[in-house]
Structure formats: structure tokens, C-alpha cells
Image: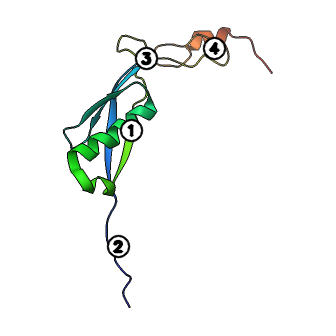
Amino acid sequence: MEAEQPRWIMREIVFDVVSEHPGRLEAQAHGFPLRITAASHEELQHEAREALIAHLGPTHGTYRVRLLRQPPQPPASAPPVRPPSASGLPLSRSGRRPAAALAAAPWRG
């Protein structure tokens, strides 16, 4: 006996948060011509559902709405962050300690 097939399939629409300023969030949908704005994350979720209802009509119920916030990126001009040296010895550009610095370092036992 075959397993019964689902009668409907839940689809998903993803909104990327493209602009985030205090009191104003803006998001763009993947694959749909929908762009929304709101004052908070909760309102953005509500606006996403409202935009989907206006765009798709009654079939909006078969869509799950998801908001994606991208992690903040450091400015392109910022130097890369290196972890501090555990021994306190200076590191070269390659990330290795120069042999002279290792030879001059006191032995810690």
C-alpha cells in the first residue's frame, strides 16, 4: 500500500533585510517584486505577510514568510584582525615568529 501524498505543499518566501537604520528596516523578497519597510523586526514580519497577501491573494496561506538579516560586514578599509600572540613575541607578516625573536626569548618552563 502506498503512502498518501500530501494535498498541498508549503512554500517559502525569503525577505533579505537590505537596509537597517534605527527606526527603519527595509527588506527585498527573493523571486518576487516585493519591497517592504517597517520600524521594527516584528512590524517587518507583519508587512511581509501583508505584501504577500496583496501580491498572491488567497494562495498566500501556502507560503511561509522568513526574514534574513545579514551579519554586519567590517568596512573594506579595516585591517584584518589577528589574535594576540600567546607568548607576547611579535609576529611577522606571515603570522610566524622571526627566528631572532625566538632565540632571544627567555625560556619558560
Instruction: Tell me the residue that label 1 is attached to.
Output: 46
**Which of label 4 and label 3 is nearer to you?**
3
Q: Residues within 10 Å of mark 3 (few under 14, many from 20)?
A: few
* Circle nearer the N terminus (3, 1): 3
Q: CA distance from mark 2 to mark 1?
A: 28 Å
User: Mark on residue 102?
Assistant: 4
Q: Residue at x 36, y 46 (%)?
A: 65
Q: Quadrant of the N terminus?
A: bottom left
Q: Are marks 4 and 3 in contact (CB under 8 Å)?
A: no
Label 2, label 4: how far apart the Cα atoms are: 67 Å
Q: For the C terminus, which image quadrant?
A: top right
Instruction: Name the N-terminal-most of marks 2 and 4.
Output: 2
| Pointer 2 or 1: first along the chain | 2
Residue ID for mark 3: 22
* Residue in the picture at 32% in, 64% down: 9
Residue 19 in percent (x, y) is at: 33, 23
Q: Residue at x 23, y 43 (%)?
A: 54
In primary-sequence order, the first of circles 2 and 3 is: 2
The reply to whether callout 2 and callout 4 are in contact (CB within 8 Å) is: no
Residue visible at 33% across and 55% down? Answer: 61
Instruction: Give the labeled residue for mark 2.
Output: 6
**Earlier along the polypeptide chain: callout 1 or callout 4?**
1
**Which class describes the residues within 10 Å of circle 1: few (<14), some (14-19), or many (20+)?**
some
Residue 15 to residue 7: above or below: above
Q: Quote the CA–CA distance across marks 2 and 3.
A: 43 Å
For the residues carrying marks 2 and 4, which lies nearer the camera in this image?
2
In percent of width and height, residue 27 lies at: 31, 31
Q: Which amino acid does the dot numbered 2 rest on?
A: Pro
Q: Do labels 3 and 1 touch, CB within 8 Å?
A: no
Q: Element type at marker 4?
A: helix
- Residue 2 sits in quarter: bottom left
